[in-house]
Image: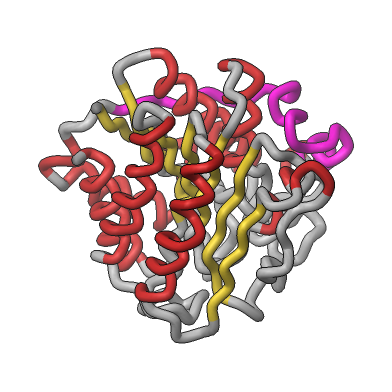
Amino acid sequence: MITALLYDPFFAVHDSGAGHPESPMRYTALVAALEDDREASALPRLSPRPATTRELAYCHGAGYIELAHNRIKGGHRSLGHPDTNVGPGSWDAAVHAAGGAMTAVDAVFNGSIRSVFCVVRPPGHHARPKQGMGFCIFNNIALAARHAQITHGVERVLIVDWDVHHGNGTQEMFYDDPSVLFFSTHQSNWFPYSGAARETGEGAGEGYTINCPFPAGTGIGPILEAFRDRLLPAAKEFQPELVLISAGFDALAVDPLGAFRLHPEDFDELTKMTMEIADASAEGRIVSLLEGGYDLEGLTSAALIHVHALAG
């Protein structure tokens, strides 16, 4: 199995403003760590392409896509939501983040590559169908799932979200859709204040959303238990053909935007458990997309461990 990396200088041009935690340094620090690491630097590298307006419309309304484009190109510093700051380069970064996710999906279906870690920004899992939110412009992981279904005929996609913040946008995209199983571990009573255990889907999608909220101070133990007791059985029944990871590293104890107590080495086991699922039914196909993670040292350490696990 071959693991690839996807990154590009486009992802450093998105600038949310001085002092903002979602800064270009997240990209430059992580890429520098990957390129300095002997194992990671030897992995093949993919280059993203921009998503088209038609592709963005897989998950987002035409009015919102136009609003985002016009506000960014018009020089505005936010999309209107108070926590979604933008800058002059944000449109190019956002469409390449979405298109990069699709490029990675194509790679795991069209060749010898079986897993990809994508160093993309802005992140995506808070972006709603008609609204940017929580540092996110477009929902990269939701767009990857729809691209897999539309372009490659995939019938069942699993999304595993271990970011400390609940992926409310991703949940909303697929809440009534039984073709996407969404599993999330996250901090309870924390931004975006969604993801209660009782939120399990609706209509045909009932039971295809699995939320595992935990209180501040949670370490790896309860999260591993949720993976073993909730995710593994559900995935065994669901039999996904593709596994997507919302790979946020803000669950680390050192992260300034969360209050979990994970350590970088904990992501080795989380990654390997997710790989077990992909190996069982998806021929090992995993696309992992960077979400949160705002302590640069913690982010780079945890992401390297994640990449080493993917690469075997």
Q: Where, quadrant-wise, is the C terminus in this rendering? A: top left
Location of residue 3 in the rendering, given as x and y in whole percent from the top left corner: 28, 32
Residue projecting furthest to the top: 110
Residue for point 21% across, 42% down: 35
- Quadrant showing the N terminus: top left
Identify the residue shown where x is 58% and y is 23%: 154
Q: Is residue 291 above or below residue 6?
A: below
Color encoding of the figure: secondary structure
> In the visual, does 236 lie left or right of 93?
left
Does 13 appear above or below 212?
Answer: above
- Which sits in the foreground, 26 or 282? 282
Q: Position of residue 211 (x, y in %)?
A: 61, 63
> Which residue, as the protein is rendered here, is positioned at the far right?
63
**Residue at left 25%, top 61%?**
301
* Residue furthest out toward the left: 38
Residue at (53%, 50%) from the top-left corner? Answer: 234
**Is 61 above or below relative to 175?**
above
Q: Is residue 212 visible?
A: yes
Which quadrant of the structure image shows residue 266? bottom left
Indicate the quadrant where residue 200 lies.
bottom right
Q: Quadrant for residue 176, please give it.
A: top right
Q: Return the residue nearer the eye: 218 or 36.
A: 218
Bounds of the magenta span?
45-68
Q: Position of residue 246 (x, y in %)?
A: 50, 50
- Does the image show residue 76? no
Relative horizontal placement of residue 251, taking residue 301 as reference (left or right): right
